[in-house]
Amino acid sequence: MLSSYYTVAGFGEHEIVIQKSRFICYINRAKTEKEAQEFIDTIKKKHWDATHNCSAYLIGEHDQIQKANDDGEPSGTAGVPMLEVLKKKQLKDTVVVVTRYFGGIKLGAGGLIRAYGKAVSEAIDHVGIIERKLMKIIRTTFDYSFLGKIENELRSSVYKLKDIYYTDHVEVETYVEEGRVQSFKDWMTDLTNGKCVIKEGDLVYLEEKVKN
């Protein structure tokens, strides 16, 4: 599992008009090639009357699956530039479809490459990029007498508080980067004078929005 990677925030669409042609970009996450193809098919059905429905997707931790489809545009002028935008922005598990309604003015190969690239780039900016960071959930159990101190320390630290459970003791769940697990444990032990029980939980991805 990657320690961190970028993907799109979720589904979105964005339209631009170039020389009277409409370029509508649809974008979404896709963890598998099947999900990507299903998304593409959905857009094609929605815009069955469009001149072109070009697509591209990039899937896998190491971009193992890369596909680009020009859907009738001159070879290399649509799908490939769309895919290149995904690569340039270092996105993973992402699928895009650009629907074009021809406006009567030919753009030429260079114009098409720029148009399809721009449509995808603007759509990504519109939807937003997420960084997914791999985190270990750490559960720390301690007496109520330490609650105020630990909660204050956590909220002003680099660690992300997940949940607090109140039973006969207090149990705090915290997101901790794998490389910081031992230092986190040492810190909690120090804060409670050794009077805590620390357990490691699941590995999960925590999502944070990336500023444009």
Image (tube, rainbow, N blue to C red):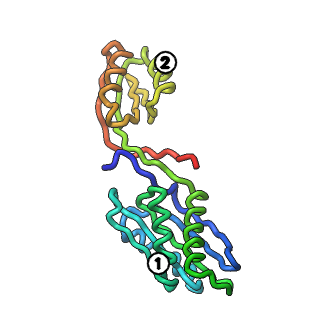
- Image position of 86 with respect to 189: above or below: below
Rendering coords of residue 20 (x, y %): 70, 79
Tell me if 103 is positioned left or right of 177 in this view: right
Q: Residue at x 55, y 74 (%)?
A: 113
Label 2, residues with CA under 10 Å away: few <14, some 14-19, many ≥20: few
Q: Residue at x 34, y 67 (%)?
A: 65
Marks 2 and 1, the one that precedes in the sequence: 1
Rendering coords of residue 125 (x, y %): 59, 57
Camera-nearest residue between 156 and 92: 92
Tell me if 124 is positioned left or right of 61 in this view: right
- Image position of 63 with respect to 129: above or below: below
- Dot 1 amino acid type: Gly
Tell me if 109 is positioned left or right of 16 in this view: left
Tell me if 182 is positioned left or right of 49 in this view: left
Q: Residue at x 68, y 87 (%)?
A: 104
Give the CA distance from mark 2 to mark 1: 61 Å
Rendering coords of residue 198 (x, y %): 30, 26
Rendering coords of residue 30 (x, y %): 42, 64
In the image, farthest residue toward the top = 193
Residue with the mark numbered 1: 76
